Amino acid sequence: MTDPAPSPDEARAALDEAARHADRLRLEDQKLRLVLVVIAVAYIAAGFLLAIPRVQQPAVSPGLILLVVMGGVVVACVVLLRRMRAASRRGITRYFQSIIAFGLWNVTVLVVSVATGWWAPGMPGFHFTISTVVAAVPLVVAAALMGARPR
């Protein structure tokens, strides 16, 4: 059984409808991009908070501040992801690939920092902050690529 070929007008209308759906999915994928940016900013903020020198006993523990920041990040990410109605297969795949790349790159930065003595007793705290900035690179790159139009 063969289906009759659509007329040129029907084919054009079907392509226009598919393009509208693809544009809506691309807009929803922007929320995944925003989640990656939130995670990167939070990671760098955590690196900064943990690198603050402890000259005196602070009024509020940096660990408590870090806990509040990370809790806020989790809430923000959950809210952003729950507001998504749909996502493209490509967007979800890129999102999880970037999270995996971030994890692997983060472990690499950690191992290299310890092995080279970059993280050693007596080293200034900004070494840790610089390491967190370098470790967040895959998230920033993935967020930039997530906004790119497919070819």
Image: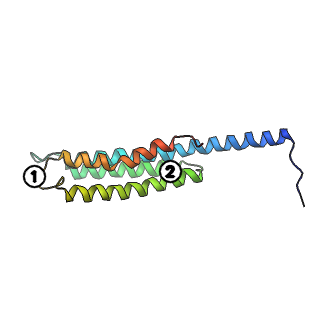
The residue that disc 1 covers is 122
Q: Nearer the viewer, residue 50 or 101?
A: 101
Residue at left offset 68%, top offset 40% = 20
What amino acid is labelled 1 in the image? Gly
Percent across and percent down for residue 37 are 41, 44
In this view, the residue in front, 69 or 151, is 151
Which residue is drawn at the image coordinates 24% and 46% (left, top)?
Answer: 129
Q: Which residue position is annotated with label 2?
A: 81
Left or right, 127 with respect to 100, comes to left
Is label 1 in a helix, a strand or a loop?
Answer: loop
Could you tell me which quadrant the C terminus lies in?
A: top right
Q: How many angstroms separate mark 1 from mark 2 (CA)?
A: 41 Å
| Residue 107 in the figure: left or right of residue 60 | right
Whether residues under marks 1 and 2 lie with C-beta atoms below 8 angstroms apart, the answer is no
SS class of the residue under badge 2?
A: helix
Q: Position of residue 21 (x, y in %)?
A: 67, 44
Instruction: Give the residue displayed 27% in from the left and 50% down from the top.
Output: 66
- Graded by Cα atoms within 10 Å as few (under 14), some (14 to 19) or many (20 or more), the crowding at tag 1 reads few
Q: Is residue 107 above or below residue 57?
A: below
Q: Closest to the observer: 4 or 30? A: 4
Return the residue found at the far bottom: 1
The residue under the point 19% across, 45% down is 126
Expressed as whole percent of the image width and height from the top left, the position of residue 62 reads: 21, 49
**Direction from residue 77 to residue 114 in the image, left or right:** left
Q: Amino acid at mark 2?
A: Leu
Say which of 115 and 132 sits in front: 115
